[in-house]
Amino acid sequence: MTDLGLHMGQAMGDQDLPGVLVSDLEGPHGICEDHAEDLKRHFNLITMQDFLENKAQLGPQIQAVYIWCGRPAVSQELLHSLPSLKIVASAGAGLDHLDLGLVASFGVKVANTPHAVSSPTADLGMALLLAAARRVVEGHQLAVSPHTENFPTDYMGQQVTGATLGIIGMGSIGYKIAQRARAFEMKIVYHNRKRRKLEEEEAVGAIYCERLDDLLQWSDFVMLAVSLTPQTQGLIGKRELRLMKPTAILINIGRGLLVDQEALVEALQTGLIKAAALDVTYPEPLPRDHPLLELKNVILTPHIGSATHQARRQMMENLVESILASLSGLPIPNEVLLK
Ligand SMILES: O=C(O)[C@H](O)CO
């Protein structure tokens, strides 16, 4: 944590601390673990419920919104009721839950925490790839089942070593996946809006695919590590799934809406592709009767890309630094600039 932050927190009484709106202090939509105590050293935390009960008094005190796991939602109505708001600080890399143009139109800055999440999310991407390739979850269920008398001799998976990995989205998460995949001796192709520098490509042995279709046709594993934007929504639909190999595995660590989920269900049911491993879906969680929950060739995790103690703490600390900097008129670390 910055010296500036420690100084501010220590020098002021609780009521003098800057007001920061949070969704809740605990519970499924609250902030994380033991973070509230750290945050309270710097800020007067105001929960959404308190704010809604006393808008007139609390609204003008709020100088920052602290978004954790996409909450609270920042609507036009909320922005209108926060006249002193300086910054919306959002945990994680994805910003699809925010209307950046709307926030900017109120003269409010935005910051996120892309560096804190890139390694753990890349780790999870590889974990899902390996687990789906080698049918780890199914294998666990088989090994612990009371009905298992003998282990099958034909319980086969897909070989990872030497296989081709297609990475869609070569930002910092995609690049870290490439670094990890290289250690598994995978061939790496990638598709991105912008080509990476030659030396960056060479460092991980990645080949640029200008055409997404080529990547889909060549890859044994397709990893979605791209942000959700109007341009990428539904990026993988029926047509794209048809281009993939029948032995291919799709891994999604980006956002559920990158994939046409109905088309994916059909592709998995009909053997158009081999399997999928999804950390993200829409909605989250899926309704309990959703067909994806029934399929044996699917692994689902509950949006846990950044869910390590270390990453979550770093995310919190990065948000504190960004808020304090904005309140002091200093350059904001991890400020999100409108393109
Ligand atoms: O956007 C991200 O970084 C993750 O989804 C947050 O956990």
Image (cartoon, rainbow, N blue to C red):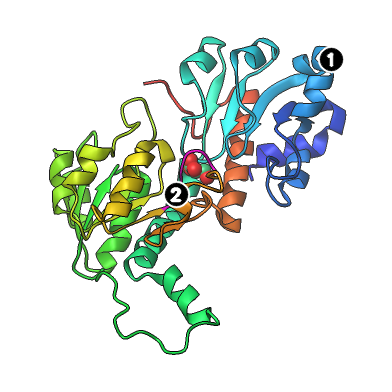
Q: Are marks 1 and 2 in contact (CB under 8 Å)?
A: no
Disc 1 on helix, strand or loop?
Answer: helix
Is 163 rendered above or below residue 73? below
Question: In percent of the image, x 48 and y 48: which residue is there?
Answer: 117
Circle number at residue 57: 1
Q: Earlier in the sequence, mark 1 or mark 2?
A: 1
Can residue 149 be seen in the rendering of this structure?
A: yes
Q: Position of residue 132 (x, y in %)?
A: 36, 64
Can residue 208 be seen in the rendering of this structure?
A: no
**Residue 8 is inside the magenta segment:** no
Give amino acid for label 2: Pro
Question: In percent of the image, x 74 and y 45: which residue is there?
Answer: 27
Question: In percent of the image, x 53 and y 47: which residue is there?
Answer: 289
Tag in front: 1 or 2: 2
Is 209 rendered above or below residue 128? above
Work out whether residue 99 or residue 252 is closer to the camera in this orientation and state it.
252
Q: Position of residue 262 (x, y in %)?
A: 36, 40
Q: Which residue is mark 2?
A: 291
Q: Residues within 10 Å of mark 2 (few under 14, many from 20)?
A: some
Q: Which residues are magenta?
A: 278-284
**Residue 279 is inside the magenta segment:** yes
Residue 225 location, quadrant: top left
Task: For ligand 1, tell me if the residue under mark 2 lies within 8 Å.
Answer: no
Is 8 rendered above or below residue 299? above
